[in-house]
Every structure is written in structure tokens, then in C-alpha cells.
Image: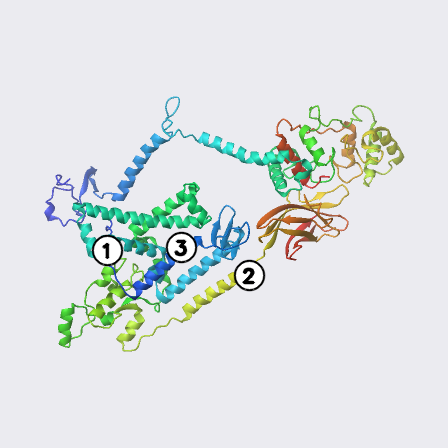
Amino acid sequence: MTEHNNDFDRVSGKTTTGHEWDGIRELNTPLPRWWVITFYLTIAWAIGYWVVYPAWPLLWSHTTGVLNYSSRADVAVELANLEKIRGDKMVALGAAPLAEIEKDPALLALARARGKTVFGDNCAPCHGSGGAGAKGYPNLNDDDWLWGGSLDQIMQTIQFGARSGHPKAHENTMLAFGKDGILKRDQIVTVANYVRSLSGLPTSPGYDKSAGAKIFADNCVSCHGDNARGNQELGAPDLTDKIWLYGSDEVTLIETITNGRGGVMPAWIGRLDPSTVKALAVYVHSLGGGK
Amino acid sequence: MNKPVNTTELQLEDDGPLYAARKKVYPQSVSGTFRRIKWGLMAFCLGVYYLLPFVRWNRGLGAPDQAVLVDLPNSRFYFFFIELWPQEVYYFTGLLIVAAITLFLMNSVGGRIWCGYLCPQTVWTDLFYAVERLIEGDRRDRMRKDAARGTMKLERFAEIVLKHSIWLMIAWWTGGAWVLYFNDAPTLVKQLVTFQAPMLAYIWIAILTATTYLLAGFMREQVCVYMCPWPRIQAALTDEWALNVTYRYDRGEKRTSLKKANELRALGEPVGDCVDCYQCVAVCPTGIDIRNGAQLDCIQCGLCIDACDAVMTKIGRETRLIGYDNDINIQRRQAGTPPVYRIVRPRTVTYLAMIACVGAVMLYALLTRTLLDINVLHDRNPVAVKLSDGSIRNAYTVRLLNKRGFDRVIAIDIDGPVNGTVHVVGADSLTQDRPMIILGRDQTTELRLLVTAPTESNPEKSIPVHFHVTDIGLGEVASATDHFVTP
């Protein structure tokens, strides 16, 4: 711009761009060439990008680009791959006899890993993330099982649930002895104390043991058994051990006898595929309580 | 306000870029002691780098037989007789510490000699220069050809194409050798040739080809001067005894032309040995004048010494006007006292002791490292489980590591809670009360381990429990301690 004679700055002795704002002029300090080249390259890159990848929004759609790229398709491919990778191994797991899985370290590791995730997704809300249970929700780490703790029994329970409405589900509910008028209030208190005595817990003073034993024999042995050791066929808990699903204090026991109990577990057979149920059974069994 | 001015009145400064453009360096070929050392080291370094992946090392069936292998998929690093697991990366930390102190030691003895002789940047740049020299000729030819850029003939064009082709081939070999350290070399070479190799291998070769080509072919001395942090660090670590490439100005000054020097000498006037031939500048790969004293750009390669020695020999004067020396000796010589070379001094001895110390620690760790190991993690949810008979059970996730190349039978014992028993899920069928498992070679196994103990014999809340795993065959034992908790 040498034709503009005033494009010089007296002070610095440098040329200016000729642009002036309120008497202030801009020195002509060009960008380094590498910078300018980089700048043009980014423009070229952007144009290339528009051509190759989806870029511009249209009214109802968008330009798809010559690559027809879609991140959604990428995800679908990844998911399909995952299924494929998992598929082979899960097929092996599905084919293995239930009793053999724990003896094969590779299958056991797979079943435990798969079981743990599925447990976290489906079972943890009731049983806790480590299967520790809560009041009314059995602890799966201990050795006390309402419906049996063998691999087959655990699998059975997972598949069909308890009182879930599935035809094969575990049924049988504890009667509401108080609410339904089978036992009177004082009888309930007496038998509650008797039940406490069965597992060596202290009883209220003045309670009639023989009366308690009689009420128990008349009403409870049909499910809990003569020796009160319970019956896994009926889901009747062992009343002589140290584990209490709803609590062992007198008030809780009175409530249990008055209103009955009948916890519900959903059936998982339609929601989880067979090999996943198998993995889950092995995982629960390996928590340590399994028989 | 600016008024129209006559530009000739103004002392116009340069309106160009804000920084000085790079002055291309045209190092001249040179021969001599240090050049020979450089050739030797270059051959050695490149030889090791390119050929090491093909060295075999028998480790038995199923194990890789490559002497140096970084097995990323299986997380193993093999170095001749050493096999490292991921949790043993601290050996690399140790190696890095030794490398750093070695660099300090080299620096305290001979300044930036790492830069001049062994740094990959120097080695590859040197090789690229050799190729350039072979094709385009020496310094003068290259300068002339570059100056005549506008009038390029076909022959010159062919030269350029040839040079870049060879550069790219070297760069490609460099990238190619790199990936061979990460997979079985002969197999990978076969795969690469038949385009069966994994995409990642090609990508890495491409990246390293590009970086080698750019750094050694174009960036050259700029890497050493602008990009590398070592000259700055080195400047802070050096001391007055370090032997840097030094122009012995006590002998060289006053410099003047050979003819004039002879005349002055005949008259008995004082005159230095330096004849201002600029050979030291011409051969310098970073394009500096060593006679300006120690400077950041000097990589201590000693080529100027070779160049100067050749001239000194030619004009019949003593060699080593430039040499590995320091200012102390120059001052001593000026004062008439003999020079002193002190390589053994507190600083170097300290560095040497540090290297020996770290090396000894590493060696000790390597020799005593366990080949059977156990890690224990206590279950947190639930921490303890009450069983129907009132006893307490704790569950642990146990990881066993077998670093040997064969399967082993491992027995597991505990020592802690009174009357405690141990059970391993899935392993109960082998032995009663003493679980045994088979631990596969060169792998880890995770076990779920249950420890049960009656409450009445263990009234404390928390009891230390020791887990011992014993190799039935070798008697090797590994132990870990955790706690048995009662609710």
C-alpha cells in the first residue's frame, strides 16, 4: 500500500494498515506465514468435513455427507459386537450343567461376573448390592433359605419367584392368625413367647410354656414342623435358628402372627434369558449361603 | 494526526515478521577422532534399535520367545530373563531415575555429550545429513544448489526426489522397527508385508515415519535449540569442572589470517593460533561459532574439534585449539600453571553413588521378587454374615498370582479367628478343610473365600486373619493379612 503516503506511523517508523478509528491507527504487523497457512488449512478442513460427514441442518433433515457416517450406527455396531463377544461365552455357560459351572474356574468367573452385574441391575433394590438383604428381604449370604439354597432351588426361585402370580411360583402364605380371628390376642402373645423360647431367646415373665406349646402344635406345626425346623417345600422358616427375616422381638412376632407374612419376589423367567438366569443362580449360590 | 510524510525521511525499520527466520545450516563433512566415535555410536545405536526385536530368547512352551517384547494385550513386559507384570512398573520408574542421574553424571563429566553422541535426534539427524551429503554433495554444493532454487533442472529435481525417498525409507524403517517391539517380530513382518497386520501397527508406523522424517529431515538442530528442555536443565546442573567443547582463546587469540600471522610471528609480535578459517563453523550441525564461548546451542559433538585439528595439522601447529576443556584450565594456562582435569570430584562421585544405590535397590527387588503372590480384599457389603447356628462368616475376594511358567497346586490356610474354617467357592472338592486350587501358569486367579468362626470363641469385634498360600510342589509361600469382623 505504498500509494498511501500517510500509511506510516511517525513514532515507530512502521507502516500502518491505513485503518483509522478516532485517530488511532493500526500498525501493519502481518501474521506469521505459518499461522496464516494454518488458518486457511482449517477452512479447507471444514469444507472437506462438510462434504464427508453429516454437517448442515436442513429443514427436516441434514446433509448426510459422502461417508454416510452416523454415530448411531457406530453404537449399533458396538452393541452387536458386544452381543457377539458375550454370545459365545454365554452359550457355553448356557450349555454347561448347573452343577459343573462352579468346578470350572473360567465358567465360574464368567457366571460370577455376569451374575454380579445382573444382580446389581435387578436384585439389588430388594436384596442390597451385596445380597445382604434387609428386613423382609432375605440375606442371600447366609445359610438360611426359605425355599432351599441348592443351585437348582435358587434357580427355581429366580425363574418363577415367590407369590409372583406365575403358575410355577412358590406359593403358600402364612395365615393372618389374629386378623382372621383364628387366635385371640392373649394366645398370640403366648405363642410368640413360645417361638422366642425355641431359639433360646428370653421370654416374658409369667408366660405359660405348655399353653404356648399347645397353640403351636395346633396351629403352626403343619408348616413349621413338629420341631419348628421349618419346611423349605412350603417356604416355612426354621424358627429355632438365629436368623429372623422380619425380626425376633416380641412385638414383631406378635405382628407376624397376627397379620401373617407373604413376601413377594417377581418371576424373572420372561425378563432375563436362560443363561443369564443361570449365571445369576451361580452368583447367588457362590455368595456363600448355598447348600 | 499523521500527516503525509516523505518515506525517505524516516528511518524505517523492517516491516517483516516479528521473529528472525531460520538460517539454514549446511554442515560440512569432516573426519577425525570425534567423527569416528560418532559413526561408531550411530552404528551401534541404530543396530541395537533395528535388530533387537529379532533376538530370540527361549522361555518355554507357550511363552513368547522374543528377547525384548512389550506384550500389551497380555500386560507383560519381557526383557531377556526378566518378565514384568503391570504392577511392577516401578522397575521402569527406577530405570528412569537411573537414566536421569546418568544424564547428570554425563553432564558433570562432559557437558551435553548425550546430545552430541547418543540422543536419538542427533543420531537420526546425522544419518539424514549423511544421506543428503551423499546425494547433493557437501556444504558448498548444497548452498549453491539451494541458492539456484529458481532455475531447477531435471537433474536437481531427481536429486531432491531421491533424497526424500531415502529419508522416507529410513523413517519408515524407524517406525517399522518400533512396532516390532510390541508383537512377535518375524510374524509381524510377515503380516506387514502381506497387509494382514492390525490397523494399529500401520497407524504407528505412519506416525513414527512422519515424526522421524520431519524431526530428522527438517527440524534438525531446531529441536535441540528450541524444543528440547535439556539445554536449560543442563545449564542449571553444570559446573566449572565439566569438560565442555571449548575454544582455547588463550591460545587462539589474537586470530588472524595464516599469511598475516606468519608475518607477525616473524616480527616477533604476539599472535594466536586461530587463523579464522571458519572450518569449525562450517562443520557445526547447529551452525554456531564455538569461538564465542560456551552457548546453549552447542551440543558438544566435537566435530569442530576434528575440523580445527585438521587445519592445525595442515599448518603445522599443535592440535586441540578447540577441545573438551573448561574455563578453569584456560585461566590456569594463562597464569602459567598446568591444566587440571578433575573427573573424580564430589559431584561425580555423588551421582555415581546414587546410580549404584538405585541400581542396587532395583537389583535387590528383582532378585527377591515373589513369583507367587496373594492380594486380599474384604467384602464390604455385607461385612459379616450371621449364620443360622450363630457363627460368623466373612467373605474375601482373593487374587492369586502365579508368575511362573507352569501350573501349580496351591493350598490355602488361614490363621486368625479361633476354630475358624476356610472355604473356597468352587474348590471344596479337593481337600477337606484345606482348600486346594490349581493356579494356571503366568496368570492370576480370583477366588471367593469364606472364613467362618463361632461367635463364642471370638468375642472381639475385629481379629487379624492371615492368609497363607502354599505351593504344594515347591513349598513357596505367600501371605497376606486382613481382618475378620464380627457384627
The residue labelled by disc 3 is B49
Tell me which numbered mark, 1 or 3, is placed earlier along the sequence. Answer: 1
The residue labelled by disc 2 is B367
Instruction: Estimate the x, y position of residue B5 in percent, counting from the top left.
Output: 11, 44
Mark 1 neighbour class, 10 Å CA radius: few under 14, some 14 to 19, many 20 or more: many
| Labels 1 and 2 positioned on one and the same chain | yes
Q: Residue at x 61, y 36 (%)?
A: A92
A171 vs B26: above or below = above
Q: Residue at x 57, y 50 (%)?
A: B442
Camera-side mark, 1 or 3: 3
Instruction: Estimate the x, y position of residue B303 in percent, counting from the top left.
Output: 28, 63
- Observer-nearest residue: B419 or B122? B122
| Labels 2 and 3 positioned on one and the same chain | yes
Left of B119 or right of it: where is A290? right
Q: What amino acid does circle 2 point to? A: Leu
Q: Is residue A92 visible?
A: yes
B470 vs A257: above or below = below
Q: Quadrant of the N terminus of chain B?
A: top left
The residue labelled by disc 1 is B26
Instruction: Give the spatial CA distance, label 2 vs label 3.
Output: 27 Å
- Observer-nearest residue: B71 or B65? B65
Mark 3 neighbour class, 10 Å CA radius: few under 14, some 14 to 19, many 20 or more: some
Q: Residue at x 19, y 54 (%)?
A: B141
* Colour theme: rainbow
Mark 2 neighbour class, 10 Å CA radius: few under 14, some 14 to 19, many 20 or more: few
Instruction: Estimate the x, y position of residue B75 in percent, counting from the top left.
Output: 51, 48
Label 3 sits on a secondary structure element that is helix
Q: Residue at x 60, y 39 (%)?
A: A110
Tell me which numbered mark, 2 or 3, is placed earlier along the sequence. Answer: 3
Q: Quadrant of the C terminus of chain B?
A: top right
